[in-house]
Image: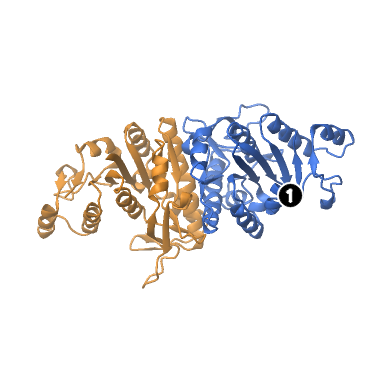
Chain colours: A orange, B blue
Amino acid sequence: MKKLLVIKIGGNIIDDDSKLSLFLSEFSSINERKILVHGGGKLATRIAEQLGIEQQLIDGRRITDAETLKIVTMVYAGYINKNIVAILQQHGCNAIGITGADGNAITAHKRIKGDIDYGFAGDIDAVNTSFIDHLLGRGTDIIIAPITHDKNGQLLNTNADTIAQEIATAMSRFYEVSLVYGFEKAGVLMDAEKDESVIHEIDPLLFTKLKADNVIFAGMIPKLDNAFSAIERGVKKVIIGKAENISELIDGKKGTTIRK
Amino acid sequence: MKKLLVIKIGGNIIDDDSKLSLFLSEFSSINERKILVHGGGKLATRIAEQLGIEQQLIDGRRITDAETLKIVTMVYAGYINKNIVAILQQHGCNAIGITGADGNAITAHKRIKGDIDYGFAGDIDAVNTSFIDHLLGRGTDIIIAPITHDKNGQLLNTNADTIAQEIATAMSRFYEVSLVYGFEKAGVLMDAEKDESVIHEIDPLLFTKLKADNVIFAGMIPKLDNAFSAIERGVKKVIIGKAENISELIDGKKGTTIRK
């Protein structure tokens, strides 16, 4: 089976020019088929502020009203996505930047209102694996901005972690997929304060034990639940660590690898 | 030889929601391989104003300083491009939106400084026909934002008319290409004040006569020079008219058709 890397990077890389530059240079040198999903970073918030559009966050999630959707579409699909592509092209990495609307790559529906109305936030319905495979087949790496569409003309702001997970699992039918989550820490840590206490590998048994011992707690639990769920759905392994060390994460020299 | 349509639309369509909607609906219904190149419209200028970035135009051309490049990348490649793609998807037209950086589709160099420094404005060097053909080959229509790159990591603001012309001529090696320039008037007019005075067809002989008689003058001369140059370089025909009548332009019922 051919190999495929799905890598997610977030604001801690996107907002830091030197880290982003280092990451993109390493990314270019990895001689495998690759999909990069990027989050948004602080630029959207800054531009919203400059334009006088108030941003509302509930539990760390942005409430996407119509004006905010306009801004995230501009910043994520325009500025961030195209600059990443241009830098990769400079490194000789032939990349194409897309959203979920392009080639009907990812369809979603507007999140159903519960207690909170998230506005134009998308929950993913389907990944168009044949389109993605068509792009990969030509040796093109794919850079995905966290915007999807509902097939009714509506763009939707969509969580980048979820996009990475859905793409990784959908592509597992055709590829041996490794899913890498870029993270602000070196991996899953035995001691949350010490980057050098990385747990190199976690399987379901160890996960149960680490939860019972309270080594893994709070926000790390859903993160690892998602990782194991991706593995149950066909992903070969999930790696969590600092994206600026991408080559070493993939080699298993750094970060935490989660597998069956 | 397979047929290909290359259509350029400008601000008069992009800035008018009802015209844009009509155009995209008609565009979707055309059962041919298609490339749409869109210009920018007024949104970039409006956002630049809101952000307090002064815009400088010389002879109708925007001077692209670093901050302006950021805005046009956001507005053209992000907001306009992705909204067009989402609306086309709604109409069942499988479109993909790209810039010249994506898939290394269009390389350019920063315009060489003459009397005027246009800043980050690009003059086109090459069109990657094999990449474009790969996308078209899957039945995907291509929507191009007027941004290119220099292969050194620099995005460049690039004239949409020129992009349309360069793509049309480059693709003429593989396709029978019709190039349509959306225009605020119904076509080339015998009487500039009367939309009903459209000249239905112009060949080089008639062009010479119309210039001598001063029927074609000022800005229409370079436009037609470009059209004839495209034809000399392999394009089958060039059509000028109102893009909201796109089906009738292609059928030859409206607009001005320029051919050998």
Residue with the mark numbered 1:
B184
Q: Is residue A63 left or right of residue B126?
A: left
Asked whether the viewer can see residue B101, the reply is no
- Dot 1 falls on a residue whose secondary structure is loop
Give, as a three-letter code, the residue at label 1.
Glu
Picture residue at 39% right of the left edge, 69% below the top: A112
Residue A100 spot, x, y in % from top left: 44, 52
Residue B140 spot, x, y in % from top left: 51, 46
Q: Which quadrant, please, contains the C terminus of chain B?
A: top right
Query: Are there few (<14), some (14-19), or many (20+) residues within 10 Å of tag 1?
Result: some
Q: Can you tell which quarter of the image residue A94 is in?
A: top left
Q: Is residue B233 left or right of residue A17?
A: right
Looking at this rendering, what residue extends furthest in the right direction? Answer: B213
Q: Is residue B104 left or right of residue A235?
A: right
Asked whether the viewer can see residue A21, the reply is yes
Looking at this rendering, what residue extends furthest in the bottom direction? Answer: A115
Picture residue at 79% right of the left edge, 41% below the top: B201
- Relative to A211, residue A129 above or below: above
Looking at this rendering, what residue extends furthest in the front direction? Answer: B1
Q: Nearer the viewer, residue B22 or B34?
A: B34
Residue B100 spot, x, y in % from top left: 53, 37
Q: Nearer the viewer, residue B69 or A141?
A: A141
Which chain letter matches label 1?
B
Q: Can you tell which quarter of the image residue A85 is in?
A: top left
Picture residue at 61% right of the left edge, 57% below the top: B25
Q: Nearer the viewer, residue B107 or A104?
A: A104
- Relative to A211, residue B99 above or below: above
Q: Which quadrant, please, contains the N terminus of chain B?
A: top right
